[in-house]
Image (tube, rainbow, N blue to C red):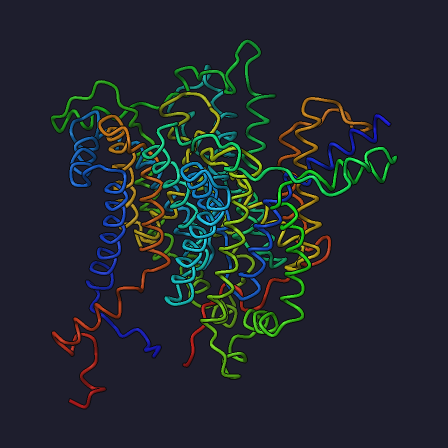
Amino acid sequence: MEVFNVLLQLLDATIRVSVPLLLACLAGLYSERSGIFDIGLEGKMLGGAFAGGAAAAVTGSAWLGLGAAVAVAVGLALVHGFASITHRGNQIVSGVAINFIAAGSTIILGQAWFRQGGRTPSLSGAGRFEAITLPGAEAARDIPVIGVIYAELISGHSILVYFAFLMVPFTWWVLFRTRFGLRLRAVGENPAAVDTAGISVAWLRYRAVICTGVLTGLAGAYLSVAQNAGFVKDMTAGKGFIALAALIFAKWKPVPAMFACLLFGFLEAASIRFQGQAWPMIGKVPVQFMQALPYVLTVVLLAGFIGKAIPPRAGGVPYVKER
Amino acid sequence: MSVPYAKLPRWADYGLIPFINLLVAFIVAGLVVLLVGENPFRAAAILIEGAFGGGQNIAYTLYYATNFIFTGLAVAVAFHCGLFNIGGEGQAYIAGLGVAMVGLTFDTVLPWWLNFPLAILGAALVGALWALIPAYLQAKRGSHIVITTIMFNFIAASIMVYMLVDVLKPLTSMAPQTRTFQPGAQLPKLNWMLEAVGFSVRSGPLNVSFLLALVMAFLVWLLIWRTKLGYEIRTMGFSPKAARYAGIKEARIIVITMMISGALAGMMALNPIMGDQHRVQLDFVTGAGFVGIAVALMGRSHPAGIVPAAILFGMLYQGGAELAFEMPNISRDMIVIIQGLVILFAGALEHMFRPWVQTVFASLSPQTVGMAKEQGV
């Protein structure tokens, strides 16, 4: 029973730390599937987290915070789109730029507006997304195993957690069962063909980039308005890059993306849970090793030793209409 | 609609357009200053005063510039080959181990002028090796170098935390850093250079690695434009297909270029470690690897552009520190915004103002942009 409880706590923590990864990973999926590489996920998440924390603190409403987070992240996504779609700039360079602009401006503006060392004021009550108890969770607690799993693991998260996991089948449906999804995938593989069919490559890619903005905004809002009670400077702490790693690990597919994020989330949760403790069978593992593991795994995958990750063919290449 | 970019006179291409891009970046940064409720012109004045106001300030400005020359050159060399080495940060960080190896072993045995070349080798070697794996994976396995170098930045950070906390830290110390190097591994300062021009410097961190950076800038120019290898690198960057057709070995060039790039980034570690703090500390790179991207883009990947661009960023770093004293609302993070804006406008949006400049040129004198013939004049 002891082991079961520890495992349950660990999985519960896994879900909580996986959600921002999952939202950012799905965000990257839309953009990269349309042929726009996006290493600016980190910056958009950070911008969203700051806007969410700031707006929720000022208005006292978590939903307005969420709206502000999405607006700012979409704004940054449009800058990326403007540079890489309209002006055919280097997408990597643009993504790097957005990461820096977000990293700097969240601290400067946060300090100037709230004067709490880059933090936003602490949120409480309606300013935060509270945990939702699913129907029957309390009653189910007495049922062994299944009931406990339902009450502890499935119930009791904020609405954004459920939304994030619902986004996985939804994204799958959009990409593989709708006309928009078909065109989105096509424009990432062969934009010239899409253009020949009379569909605007630029507009399709802009829509994909906007989807990315919305989802990164949600990821940011989750960090500052749901998981924590306010924005702390540099609170994304590389999550955008782990999400990017998960996206590659999942070979740009929504359902594997969820599992990749859960895996990376599990690694993070486990490294926090077992910090400084000896692991069963392995012995003591340095925390830094656990922290580096997602990156190492991604590099190994990219090297083609465990399956091959093939990016969308037109990824990173600006589309030029006629030559 | 998509008119191919017409030719502009060289001075417009290499001078006017980068200048306009930079100007726009600073105007937007000025708007941020305005948003925070400060006067951007006063901020600029304090910044310049803080960077060049005295010998001390200049010493600091050039000290920061030294870091950025190394990392800027690193990014630029990779750019010439069509590679984006975003891993300068990690390469410089891990190269701290190379410097530490030399410094901790020989600091009581050898004089600085023997330790310095050894440490250069150590730093360059470790930096190059850290770039080798992503380079090999790109060359042989086709994994995207941008992604692998990003991952390697994080891996390097984890390794360095582990090394400093668990391995290199002296038992008696609490802070995660190595012991302080003895004078044998401390580089001489260059304050006499500034004093010779009539400034007074009490204690500045400027040291001989600045001269090393300048030598490297010259060597990079020599390599890229005056050697066979440089020619092959540029050919690869211009058109990998043409390079392949010309019998240039793609994999070999990618690996060599990335190792040179990693070595240059690694040498950056010399400046703070042997030149200033005399020990390896956590996070001693402080973003210099990323500033290198902005510096390389601004300097158009040419050493003659990179050195002034690095000095400009050194000015922003040093002046920014002074600015934070005068205007508490503007912390050093303002530099991060400016850096981002420079990367955006000088890099991703570099062609934004081009059509507009072309129109101006075409209306002033059609010959300069080669329009006369097409119009049947």
Q: Is residue A170 left or right of residue B87?
A: right
Residue at horizontal 20%, vertical 64%?
A: B12
State which quarter of the image contains the N terminus of chain B.
Answer: bottom left
Considering depth in this image, is B228 or A296 the residue closer to the camera?
A296
Q: Is residue B150 left or right of residue B360?
A: right
Considering depth in this image, is A146 or B87 the residue closer to the camera?
A146
Q: Visible in this render: residue A37?
A: yes
Q: Is residue B93 left or right of residue A134?
A: left
Residue B185 on image: x %, y %: 41, 21
Q: Visible in this render: residue B105?
A: no
Above-or-below relation of A311 to A55: below
Q: Quadrant of residue B347?
A: bottom left
Q: Quadrant of residue B180?
A: top left
Total marks placed = 0
Considering depth in this image, is A251 or A72 the residue closer to the camera?
A72
Residue at horizontal 22%, vertical 70%?
A: B8
